[in-house]
Amino acid sequence: MESIKRGGAVVMQDYLNAEARHLDFAIGIRSEDGNVRAVIVSSVVSNNTIFPIFSDYTGLGHTGETLLVKLSDHGLMHINPTRHSSIRKIETPGHGKERFRLGTSAASGSEGIDEGIDYRGKRVVGAYRHVPLLNWGIVVKMDVEEAFREITTLRKNFHNRNIDFGHNASDFLFHYKQVYRTPCQSQAKNKGNSIR
C-alpha cells in the first residue's frame, strides 16, 4: 500500500497457473500536492501483451531465448513459453549449482553474466536480472556452442594459418639452402682452394 501512496505500482495478484495467465496490479495517481487522488486497478493478460515481446528471437541465433522466471515452491517456474519446448510452464527442482543457475539467480534478486545448464540440459551463457516489482527474473541466454562458434572458428583458422606459415617458411628455408647457399659455399670453397 505504501508504494501506491508514493505513486508506484503494486502487483496485487499473479494468476500464472490460470488458463489465461494474467496479472492484477494497482497504480497510485498523485495530485500536485502529493496526495493520492486515484488508484487505477487493472488486469494484464500475459499472452496478448508481455509474452509476444519475449518471442522475438532477433539476434539470438538458433538457440537463444529470453525467459521470465519466478521461484516457486517446486523450484523455478518459467512464466513465458520457451523457444524449445511446447510445455506452457516448466517447474524444475534445482539439481546442483550449475543447473538453472541463471534463472535461479535472477529470480533470487541478483544480476550478472554467467554460464550454466538450462532446462534442456544444455550448457548456456547468458545475462540475467531481477525484476523487483514482480519478484521475477529475466534471463537472456544462448547455447555456449553457438555463442562462441565464431570465436572458435577464428581461433582454428588462425592456428591453421600459423601452421601453414610454418610449413611455408621451412619450405622456403630448405629451398634457399639448396638453391643459393650450397652453390655459394661451393664457390667460396673453390675460390679458397685457388688462392692457396
Image (cartoon, rainbow, N blue to C red):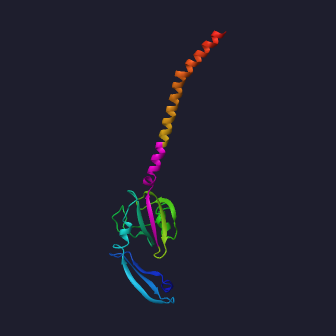
Q: Residue at x 42, y 66 (%)?
A: 67
Where is residue 4 drawn, in percent x and y?
48, 85
Where is residue 47 drawn, in percent x and y?
34, 72
* Residue 9 among those drawn in magenta: no
**Residue placed most toward the observer, 144 or 108:** 144
Q: Is residue 178 above or below residue 30?
A: above
Q: Residue at x 48, y 36 (%)?
A: 164
Where is residue 160 drawn, in percent x and y?
47, 39
- Residue 97 appears anywhere in the view: no
Magenta stretch, residue numbers: 136-157
Q: Is residue 17 left or right of residue 134?
A: left
Where is residue 63 drawn, in percent x and y?
39, 57
* Residue 148 among those drawn in magenta: yes
**Residue placed most toward the observer, 25 or 101:** 25
What is the quadrant of the C terminus in the image? top right
Q: Is residue 27 above or below residue 71?
A: below
Q: Please count the marks in the image.
A: 0
